[in-house]
Image (cartoon, grey):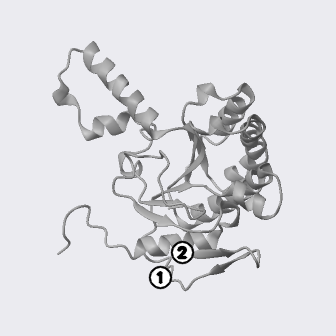
């Protein structure tokens, strides 16, 4: 865990319990709640939008590092369905960020063989944001490496409600019974359903900024995810901290409700 000392304006790393080992299992799917941009800016007496801008630089760093470590899917919580409640100026800035981010970063993503996906209720995003998202997906569609999956205007409860409605409509149309409803069927109708079934559920969920809650993120998919919380604010998160989170994952005893012999 990293602790922030305001009087020193820096983070101090507490003694790490585990050591990262590249030869041990790397989570195939990592999800991150990128929290703390605003506080990072406020600690430096900067406007909140400066924290969001710096946070995008961290996205670039972590995307490259995760890809090179062998992660198959990196899902980043970029904007929630509740974030519309923020001040209009901040929301406008956040809606412009994907435009600036993709325009500058897509060539590097192509070089890194990273494929972009965006899940969420993107139809409600401004037209310029939708256009940037569509271009990034199209430009990287032939890449075969890690999937960089942004959750943009995403909320897990809304996702589940939408899935239930879609399943109900399908069953009603073909006059099928409720016996056809299975976990796999539900998983197929969630926004991670585009992924192979073995990659849909994150093995590791990371949240930055010291907050220890899920905030309506992937509620179905993280049923058996390992959780890692760090005090580091998102703009300060780096490859070393990512490896620390993976090291913690590597040392968890994952039993999925059963017992290991």
User: Which residue appears farthest toward the right when viewing the image?
Assistant: 46
Residue closer to the observer: 77 or 40: 40
Q: Is residue 255 above or below residue 244?
A: above
Q: Is residue 245 left or right of residue 136?
A: left
| Nearer to us in this view, 28 or 51 | 51
The answer to whether 152 is drawn above or below residue 66 in the figure is above
Residue 45, image x, y percentages: 83, 60
Residue at image position (26%, 20%) is 171
Q: In which quadrant of the rendered image does the C terminus lie?
A: bottom left
What's the residue at 65%, 29% (across, down)? 125
- Total numbered labels placed on residues in the image: 2
Residue at image mark 1: 18
Q: Identify which residue is drawn at 28% across, 40% down.
A: 184
- Residue 60 visible from this viewpoint: no
List x then y, in percent, for residue 104: 79, 47
- Residues under numbered marks 2 and 1 in contact, where contact means CB atoms less than 8 Å apart: yes
Q: Position of residue 131 (x, y in %)?
A: 71, 30
In this rendering, would 150 be left or right of 50?
A: left
Q: Which residue does the numbered mark 2 point to in the structure image?
A: 244
């Amino acid at each position: 865990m990293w602790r922030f000392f305001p009087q020193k304006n820096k983070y101090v790393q507490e003694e790490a319990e585990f050591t990262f080992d590249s030869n041990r299992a790397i989570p195939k799917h990592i999800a991150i709640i990128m929290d703390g941009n605003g506080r990072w800016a406020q600690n430096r007496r900067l406007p909140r939008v400066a924290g969001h801008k710096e946070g995008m630089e961290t996205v670039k760093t972590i995307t490259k590092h995760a890809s090179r470590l062998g992660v198959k899917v990196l899902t980043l919580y970029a904007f929630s369905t509740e974030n519309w409640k923020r001040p209009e100026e901040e929301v406008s800035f956040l809606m412009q960020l994907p435009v600036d981010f993709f325009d500058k970063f897509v060539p590097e993503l192509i070089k890194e063989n990273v494929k972009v996906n965006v899940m969420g209720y993107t139809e409600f995003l401004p037209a310029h944001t939708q256009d940037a998202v569509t271009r990034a997906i199209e430009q990287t569609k032939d890449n075969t490496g890690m999937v960089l999956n942004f959750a943009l205007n995403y909320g897990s409860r809304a996702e589940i409600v939408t899935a239930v409605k879609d399943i109900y409509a399908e069953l009603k149309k073909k006059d099928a019974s409720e016996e056809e409803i299975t976990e796999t069927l539900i998983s197929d109708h969630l926004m991670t359903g585009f992924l192979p079934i073995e990659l849909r559920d994150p093995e590791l969920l990371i949240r930055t900024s010291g907050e220890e809650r899920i905030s309506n993120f992937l509620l179905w998919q993280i049923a058996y995810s390992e959780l890692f919380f760090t005090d580091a604010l998102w703009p300060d998160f780096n490859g070393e901290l990512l490896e620390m989170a993976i090291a913690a994952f590597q040392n968890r005893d994952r039993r999925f409700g059963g017992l290991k012999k």
